[in-house]
Amino acid sequence: MNPPIQSHRLTLHGVQLDVYEQGQGRPILVLHGEDGPFPQAPFFALLANQGRVILPTHPGFGHAPDMTDIDTVDDLAYLYLDLLDECDLRDAVVIGCSLGGWIAAEMAVKSTARLGRLVLIAPLGIKVGDRETRDIPDIFALPPEEVVRLQYHDPAQAALDYTGLSDDELLVIARNREATALYAWEPYFHNPKLRQRLHRIAIPTLLVWGASDRFVTSGYYGTAYRDAIPGAQLAVIDRAGHWPHVEQPEAVVERVGAFLVSV
Amino acid sequence: MRAWHFSENAYHLLPDAKEYDSIRVTLPNRYYDPKLGADLYHRFIDEWLIAEELGLDIMVNEHHQTATNLNPGGPIVMGILARETKAARLLILGNPIANRREPVRVAEEMAMVDVYSRGRLEVGFVRGVPYEMSAGNHRPTRMMERFWEAYDLILKAWTRHDGPFNWEGKYFHHRQVNIWPRPYQEPHPPVWITALSPGSAQAVGERGTVVACFLTGFDGSKQVFDSYRARRAELGLPPAGLDRFAYAALVYTGETDEEGYAGARKLMWYVEANKVPFQFTSPPGYHPPQAMAGAMKGPASGVFKMFQNPKLESFMEHGLVFAGNPDSVYRQIIKFYEHVGGFGHILLMGQAGFLDHQETVKGMQLFAREVYPRLKELHPAVAA
């Protein structure tokens, strides 16, 4: 039986933050991606067997309120460093995927004082190619079904069908897209300075990548990320695209679990 | 009432729409022939000059990366018209100031045109249509916050004459704002702002500029104008005169109703040719999330549904098109005028690609000679 999911709203220096929690033990801060938090997803239940999973909703996503003064990934990185301070979390594991991976990397270059390990699942956030290379496909200029095709190993499983969704579920999707645009529109899903700062991450770091990620590939984007973080490992998950923890949650949690106990 | 001739300067000589996904943002410019384009530019300028001869005022707008409008720099054609015309008022509606990275530059450009024209400029500010977001890489979220900061900065740049001032806002930073030239008109050119929803009309009403509606039809326009008036009343501000309200419609006046409808059908090209995929019509944050959630559920409803299957009869019924013989056009405008509580400016979209030069001019002439005099009587206080 899975440990129960709790949710509450914190106020950190005037910023309202909605947080889900599940499990006990070592703190595991999970930073969600463009699709918003999914506390009921198998990934979190599996992860909650390994520690105390803390899953905040980035301001503006889901049902979380918009915060006027929070409008950059830099703001989010400081917000979550504040969260670690506020809850006095130590030796925390920080896991972020896609947009959340970018936020996690920005946190780690600022301070690893409260961080024990870092797991980046197909993180965005760096510029790899030259100015005329579009490292990351422009989700705001592509047909939605093409974005799905690029991001999933099995696009049929993720097909967009809004007809069965409630008004509230649709509203959440719309809010998630809006919040993503707020944080990632320009520079597009990256901080031009982040790559040159990644050397500061002096804690064990695991990069997890779907073998079928056609959105940002492990061979191009993943290796560039790995090479910029001293000692980082890159694990590739079969039969998974840009959201390996959604398509292959068991395999990802198994790989992460092994990393957390490794010396 | 004042009437303004407005042309989008479209480039209509396109292949079959089956050959491309979108007329905006991504349509390759190999489909544009600059030699034909030059002919079109000069034709459209000639038509604006004819509008002036007919006693109409002149309106120009601006769009980007689209065949529907070849004026990516509205202020440039305004500069030409400021020199080529002598009497007409010149309205640019408008400058997309949430998207212009340097509002001070907008203040400079507008001051320059105002001086060229010896004070005939009217300056519109617009949010910009959703398709401009990808075209200009403009973030679609929190746009109105940027818009109003740019607005405040431009107004201050126009009206401060004692040396530089400082501006370190959320979106724009300047330490030495001191524009040359300053505007010809005192304290600055009249300002217009577009509003398509009651919510945005409130903010315009607070500031008391002209509010303009585009193709919003009977009820949409009434909601905008009512909201503007209500907000002023709520704040205890003086009631707005009719010269604060403007409406843009497709207008073609013929000798007969049949000729008027035939011209209007050609104007409908703007609506029919506007093939744009979802990702460009609905960039995240541009529309409120509730509206986006509704759009995901299925086809749009109400007035917006008409745009998916445009029909002249339906557009006329809803007040987006005024067409027919002069009496018919007059009656249609009066009906609209009475429904929305009156307005002081009609913006005439009177040209579209397949409407050739002679047809365009004929429609303008019949409007100017047979319809406009009666509209002027309607509201003499703002008559030209």
Image: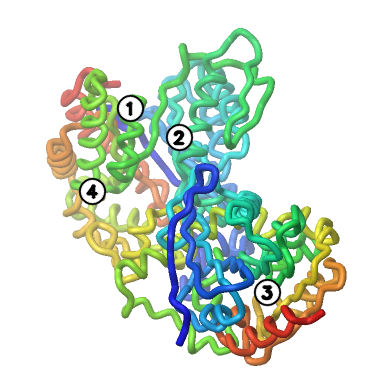
The answer for how far apart the CA atoms under marks 2 and 3 are is 42 Å
The answer for how far apart the CA atoms under marks 3 and 4 are is 48 Å
The residue indicated by pointer 1 is B206
Location of residue A13 in the rendering, given as x and y in whole percent from the top left corner: 54, 43
Q: Which mark is residue A122?
A: 3
Task: Return the residue nearer the eye: A61 or B179.
Answer: A61
Mark 2 closeness class: few <14, some 14–19, many ≥20 residues within 10 Å: many
The answer for how far apart the CA atoms under marks 2 and 1 are is 15 Å
User: What amino acid does circle 4 point to?
Assistant: Gly
Location of residue B229 in the rendering, given as x and y in whole percent from the top left corner: 22, 30
The residue indicated by pointer 2 is B125
Residue at the bottom extreme of this rendering: A239
The residue at 55%/84% (across/down) is A46
The answer for how far apart the CA atoms under marks 1 and 4 are is 23 Å
Q: Nearer the viewer, mark 3 or mark 4?
A: 3
The residue indicated by pointer 4 is B217
Marks 1 & 4 on one chain:
yes
User: What amino acid does circle 3 point to?
Assistant: Ala
The kind of secondary structure element at disc 1 is helix
User: What amino acid does circle 1 point to?
Assistant: Glu
